[in-house]
Image (cartoon, rainbow, N blue to C red):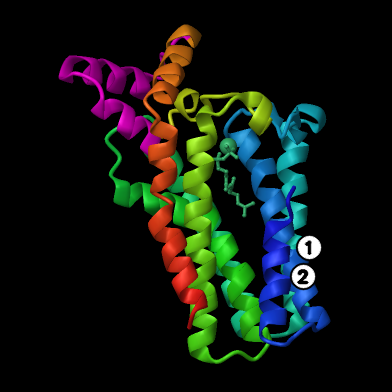
Amino acid sequence: GKRLRPLLAVYMGRLFGCDHPDIYDMAAAIEFVHVASPIHDNVLDNATTRRGILAAHTVYTPTVAILGGDVMLAHAAGMVARIGDKFISMQFAEAVAKTAVGEINEFNYLGDANLSYENYLDVITGKTAWCLKVACELPAYRAGASEEQVKAAAAFGLELGIAFQIVDDALDIAPSKDTGKPSGGDLRERKCTPLIKFYLETLSDAEAKTLTEKFREGSFTEAEIESVIRVMREKGLDRKTRDLANPHLERAKKALTL
Ligand code: FPP
Ligand code: MG
C-alpha cells in the first residue's frame, strides 16, 4: 500500500514539533486498522484481487483472512493502549467502530440506486474518512497542539478522507490495468455511488426504472456492465464524480490555514 495514513500521522506530529515514538506507534496502529479493513472488505465484496494481486481470503480461506484481520486489530489496540492516554484510546476505538458501521450502512443500502447523497456521504465518512481523521487528529493531540488545532487537524483528515473515497469511487470505471481491480466493481456489488446517480440522470424514465430494478436485483449481464461503463466514460461521469471531491479538498486546505 501507499502507507498514506502513517505518513499523515508522522507529518502531523512533526508539524506540531513532536517526533516522539508514540507518534510512530499511533501511525503503525492506524495502518494496521487500514490493512485489516481491505482484508475483511475483500471477503464481504467477494473480491478476488486487489492491486493486481490475489486477495488474502483466496489464498488463506475467508476464515483465516477474517481472523487474521482481527489479530491485526487487536495488535493495533494494544499499541495504542500502551501510549496510556484515554482520549487517544477512545478516539482510536471510535475510528474502528465508525469504519465497521460505515460498512454496515453500505451493506444495508446495497441495491438502492435512490440512495441520497447525504446517506452516501455518511457511508464514506464512516468506512474511509474516520481512519484518516484519527491519523491526523491523534498525533496533533499527542504533540500538545491546542484544542482548536487538534480540531483543525481532525477536520483536515476527515475532509481528505471523504475526497479520497469519492475519487476511489470515480476510479471504479478506470481500466483495471490502472487500478489492479476489475472495472465496474461497484455496479456488480450493487453499491450506489455518484457515478450511478449521474448515469441514471442521462436515462429516460423507462430506462432509469429498468436500471434501478436490475441494480436492486444485481441482474446485469457482463455485456450490460461493459456497456454502462463505456457510456459512463464517454459522458465523462468519472470526471463529474471526481469534481464532487473538490469542496472537501477546499475544506481540508482551509483547515490547514488555521
Ligand atoms: C473499501 O471500500 C472499504 C473500506 C474503506 C472499509 C472496510 C471496512 C470493513 C470491511 C469493516 C471492518 C472494519 C475494520 C476496522 C477492520 P470499497 O469496497 O468501496 O473499496 P475497494 O474498491 O477498494 O474495495
Ligand atoms: Mg471493496
Q: Nearer the viewer, residue 4 or 42?
A: 4
Q: Quadrant of residue 84?
A: bottom right
In the image, taking residue 60 as reference, residue 126 lies left or right, namely left
Q: Position of residue 199 (x, y in %)?
A: 32, 27
Q: Is residue 250 above or below residue 101?
A: below
Q: Nearer the viewer, residue 238 or 128?
A: 238
Q: Position of residue 160 (x, y in %)?
A: 52, 60
* Cβ atoms at labels 2 and 1 below 8 Å apart: yes
Using the rendered image of the protein, determine whether residue 181 is visible from the camera's viewpoint: yes
In the image, taking residue 194 as reference, residue 31 lies left or right, namely right
Query: The residue under label 2 is which amino acid type?
Result: Gly
Crowding near the residue tagged with mark 2, few <14, some 14–19, many ≥20 C-alpha atoms within 10 Å: some
* Ligand 2: image quarter: top right
The residue identified by callout 2 is: 78
- Which residues fall within the magenta stretch? 194-221
Mark 2 vs ligand 1: CB under 8 Å?
no
The residue identified by callout 1 is: 75
For the residues labelled 2 and 1, the Cα–Cα distance comes to 5 Å
